[in-house]
Image: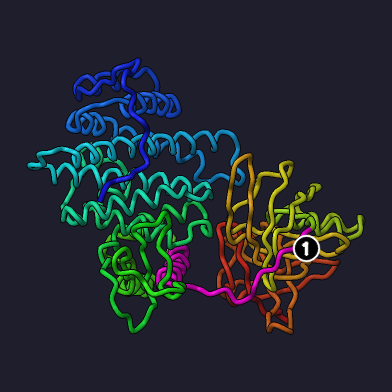
Amino acid sequence: MALNLNIPALLEHPVFIAETRPQKIHQLLQELNTQDAVDIATHLHNELETLNRQKVSPSQRMQALDCYRTLVIKTTNVLATDYINATLPLEDKAKSAATACESLWIELGYGYKLVLIDLQNQLIKLRTDKNSAIAIQRAMHAIAQHALVQYQTYQTPPSFIWSDLHQLYFCAAKLGIMHTVIADEPAQLSIKTYAHLLTSIEDTYKHTLLMSLAQPHHLIQQDISAIADYLAHHVSTARITAIEPLENSSGAFIINLTSDAPPVPYSKKKTAPNPDSELLLHTIDLIRDIHEDLNKLQNRTSPVNGSISPDANHNDYIALLAYLITNWGISPKRIFSRSAKNGDIEIVAGIDKIHNIITATSITNDDSHLALNASHATPSRWKILNISATGISIRRYHNAEKNIKVGGLIALRGKNEQQWSIGVVKWANCGTRDRLDIGVQLIAPCAESAVAQTFQHSAISNILVLPEIVAVKQVATIIAPRGTYINGRQLTYTYNQKSEQVMLNKLIERTHDFERIQFNIIH
């Protein structure tokens, strides 16, 4: 199979000659007179770009790349802190950090792909398999890290990522090196990253495929990182096989090695799989492992395999593992169809701002003291893309606020509507020039703004009271800041000059932003 990888053109007569001597590279990196991650990233990118645009022997190129790789990993880890908690669309600093990380991973990937191509083009290939395995695995790791930056900034990875990954895996399969153990450099083991657990091409490939199947655009950035770490401990239990008859298609995904696309659920394949160009990814054993970890967490113990830290928030991981079981097991099906719709809609994001806008809309000025830290909330105008029975997809206009997060609470109001509907941001997709599309699950057609005080604390917080909806058997709930819910906790909330004393009895939903809680009124 001839490799047709995404690589830069090599210059016949480069202006600058790349440094390839490891000792000299280490010396130059130590002499870098800066601690600023952006400056270091710029220097590394320039050096890698020079190296990747000229002809160098594969052994020299590999040595040089390995010298730069440790610092690339360290630098991108530091830069990631600028976008890992960012709201959408990204502000300039977060956007610059993400762009710098992408550029470094692209160049590092270029380098290892060039090494592989040169090794495969050699007429005499004695003892090249080990170096080919290293080049493929490190190229895959760079591609996977590039994709991870895209996921955490809610962009769609370019299609060449998948074409390259499939070709690299197929090449490794032809050479019989998918399971060759590849250890990281000692210096890289000290860096906090899951990569050292992925010691073969097979595991690195499966990890990248499964991260795509986790639908990261539905997750907050920290959860994407948490899944990458967790999966690295369990990825060996996922299997790749040739096409074979299946009694049950749950946990089976089709990989098309000739495509530029990620794997797709077997159940969504409209034609019979092609055994000449397609493979199966099986996740049933992986799902069993996740179920075991989930049971341990539900019984208030930590998994002994090290995949979840004893200090981690177990409630967060319980929700995350349930999410993975759904996405890596039985693929969810859309219940309601979408229909395109034109028009604009106003939105407000965050509990406090939603509280204030509802207060301003529905309560007289004499009662406005009920709003805690009341400040005027200005709605943003968005464009409606499509709508279904339970959700809506909308696109940001360029002058709207930059304050959206997946899992965040928003209020929506269409033209000529008096009340604000309440929804949760379920996915996001960013594009160029601050384009942002989001999908919103609608959870209530209206809400009351209220202030709540628990009996255990004197602190007061803004909450929203969502009405009972008899038609869909949805009981009344409250939306409160994260950390409010404790089973049996009592609180008093006040709205419309009325006070209610309630007991919290069931957590319906929890995100990074809020908790949605069922309650009983205490008479």
Q: Residue at x 20, y 44 (%)?
A: 134
Asked where in the image residue 514 lies, by quadrant, the reply is bottom right
- The residue stretch that appears in magenta: 315-342
**On screen, residue 142 above or below 325:** above
The picture places residue 460, in percent across and down from the top left corner, at: 70, 58
Q: Residue furthest top?
A: 15
Query: Can residue 320 be found in the magenta stretch?
Result: yes
Q: Residue at x 78, y 57 (%)?
A: 345
Q: Residue furthest left?
A: 126
Q: Residue at x 88, y 62 (%)?
A: 416
**Which residue in the structure is indicated by mark 1?**
449
Asked where in the image residue 284 lies, by quadrant, the reply is bottom left
Query: Can residue 307 be found in the magenta stretch?
Result: no
- Quadrant into which the C terminus falls: bottom right
The picture places residue 412, in percent across and down from the top left corner, at: 75, 60
Number of numbered labels in the structure image: 1
Left or right: 401, with 115 as reference point: right
